[in-house]
Amino acid sequence: MSKTALITGASGGIGYELALLLARDGFDCILVARSRDKLDELAARLESEFRVKTLVVARDLSKPTAVDEIYEEVSAASMSIDVLVNNAGFPVYGRFVDTDWQAELDMLQVNVVALTALTKLFVRGMVERRNGRILNLASTAAFVPGPLMAVYYASKAYVLSFSQALANELQGTGVTVTALAPGPTRTGFQKRGVMEDSRLVRGQIADAKSVAAAGYRGMMRGKTIVIPGFSNKLIPWVARVSPRGAVTRVVRRMQERVSD
């Protein structure tokens, strides 16, 4: 019997790499992102290399109607979701008093609302079938306040808290929830957030392939939190034992542009 995975943000970066891993293991893939052209290219690759079925659903998750449209399209195709990967997300960079409010509303719609709504819609079927895995993309940003990206960091704290709580609620149901919390990762993320010059993303940072592999392994093992990279694993511990004000100042320094 075929298995099906739905991956948001599948057109590039971590989502793209997760789609490859899922298809490699025989999952049919429902690919969601804004760019139909990129999704069509990925779908062709998955079908050719791994002989799986694909469904391309080009939707912008910042639009409030997108989640219901995705659910209706999946239902119309009579596909049951065995793995849900809520990978889509983007940042807004800058001082909160200066940033664009509509951009932040769109970000919250993608990072928080769409993630929660997709989980709500698909987790019930998983529980009924007593089998399923959910992977939510959090971040090491979830563990600390983030001056110059205040709303983004708060959105990732929501993802982490929601994932941990839901994982607890679902114990014994056959459904697991995993929060993947990488540090800075080389994707299109920095460019969209206009933060290429911040200290946080300069120099050696993780690649999407290794982050996806760590998240995939953790999800398949039913781990609740996956933090790739040794130094990243220290962040929650340092944040707990250090004065909150000091942590916030350090994060602010890391977020500032090199020219600042």
Image (cartoon, grey):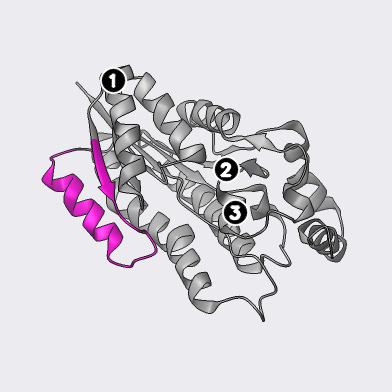
- Tell me the kind of residue under disc 2: Thr
Residue to which mark 3 is pinned? 191
The kind of secondary structure element at disc 3 is helix
Q: Mark 3 is on which residue type?
A: Lys
* Residue contact at pointers 2 and 3, CB within 8 angstroms: no
Residue 195 or residue 155, whichever sits in front: 195
Answer left or right for 252 relative to 16.
right
Q: Is residue 105 above or below residue 171?
A: below
- What is the tally of numbered marks visible in this picture? 3
Tell me, for residue 187, which label it has, or none. Answer: 2
Q: Is residue 46 magenta?
A: no
Vertical placement of residue 224 versus 252, above or below: above
For the record, the magenta segment spans 55-80
Residue 155 locus on image (x, y percent): 56, 61
In front: 28, or 190?
190
Q: Bin the neighbour count of mark 1 within 10 Å (Cα to Cα): few under 14, some 14-19, many 20 and up.
A: few
Kindly identify which residue carries mark 1. 48
State the image coordinates of residue 126 (x, y, percent, origin top left).
Answer: 29, 39
Q: Residues within 10 Å of mark 2 (few under 14, many from 20)?
A: some
* Image coordinates for residue 63, horizontal then vertical, percent: 34, 66
Q: Are marks 1 and 2 in contact (CB under 8 Å)?
A: no
Q: Tag 1's secondary structure?
A: helix
In the rendered image, the quadrant that contains the N terminus is top left
Name the residue furthest bottom: 97
Tag 2 or tag 1, which sits nearer the N-term? 1
Is 92 located above or below residue 156 in the figure?
A: below
| Alpha carbon distance from label 1 to label 2 | 25 Å
